[in-house]
Amino acid sequence: MTSRYRVGAVDFTVLPLREAVELVLSLPNHIPTHGHPGIAVHFANAYNVALARQDRSYAELLNSADYVFSDGVPITWVGKRAYPQLSTTWERVYGPDVMTMVMERSQPSTPRHYLLGSTPDVLQALTKSIRTRFPGAQIVGTDSPAFRTPTEQELRDRDQQIAESAATHVWVGLGTPRQDWEVKRLATRLPVAALAVGAAFDFIAGTKPQAPIWMQRSGLEWAYRFAREPRRLAKRYVWGNSVFSLEAARTLRRASNQD
């Protein structure tokens, strides 16, 4: 497992994007070395860091995961300043980019992809988009669970369906933080790589537009998304960005005191 470096209360896996993609592709080969049935992969941004400050159990969830990548540009800015020795390797490892690049590299024999989350319409559009854009990618199952707490029987049925599909990678798009808890649960029960990728489903399906590249690179993607869905994303960006700013300051102060 790679070393982890803290921003706020979250320990991040630091890798260049292409190395992270190679790692994700190879994860099924590493399952026996991790000491538990599966592998949990998270993509954390400023909002995740804010939630981790508010909820200790959520921070423990992320910090007990196998990999937590820097999903947001502000995370990389803080990381590069706090850990200057990592300035050339600490890149944004964005969930939608990783999912897209893994699908591009997939072959008909492996990996075997399972899509869990979102709505039936989005899943249908996502499956169609993947099969059109990435014909080598094998989708072995999909599931759009009801947006409520599942029963134990429903979870057993879900696990059985994934197991019977012989999936190697389960992509989870259930929204934050729900998808992170589900990734942990899957990794403790099934020999799969479970990845919490959030909005990747909508972006790859084409059901929601992504921010222009210049906005993504300048750390303004949040403003683009907030402008399009202000009511739904108000807490995420108004509260989350405020808390993250405090966490960033704490991280930089801590790093300065260690020099």
Image (cartoon, rainbow, N blue to C red):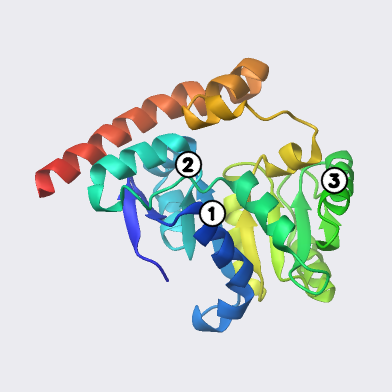
Q: What element carries label 3?
A: helix
Residue toward you, 163 or 21: 21
Q: Mark 1 points at which residue?
A: 42
Query: How far is the residue under mark 3 from the one under mark 1?
Result: 23 Å
Name which residue lies at 81% across and 74% down.
109
Which of the numbered marks, if any, corresponds to residue 48?
2
Q: Pick whichever of labels 3 and 1 is earlier in the sequence.
A: 1
Please tell me in which quadrant of the rendered image residue 244 appears: top left
From the viewer's side, name the closer residue of 24 and 143: 24
Residue 188 visible in the displayed image:
no
134 or 194, nearer to the observer = 134
Q: Distance between the residues labelled 1 and 2?
A: 10 Å
- Pick whichever of labels 1 and 2 is earlier in the sequence: 1
Q: Residue at x 35, y 60 (%)?
A: 4
Residue under pointer 3: 129
Residue 227: percent from left, percent from top: 62, 15
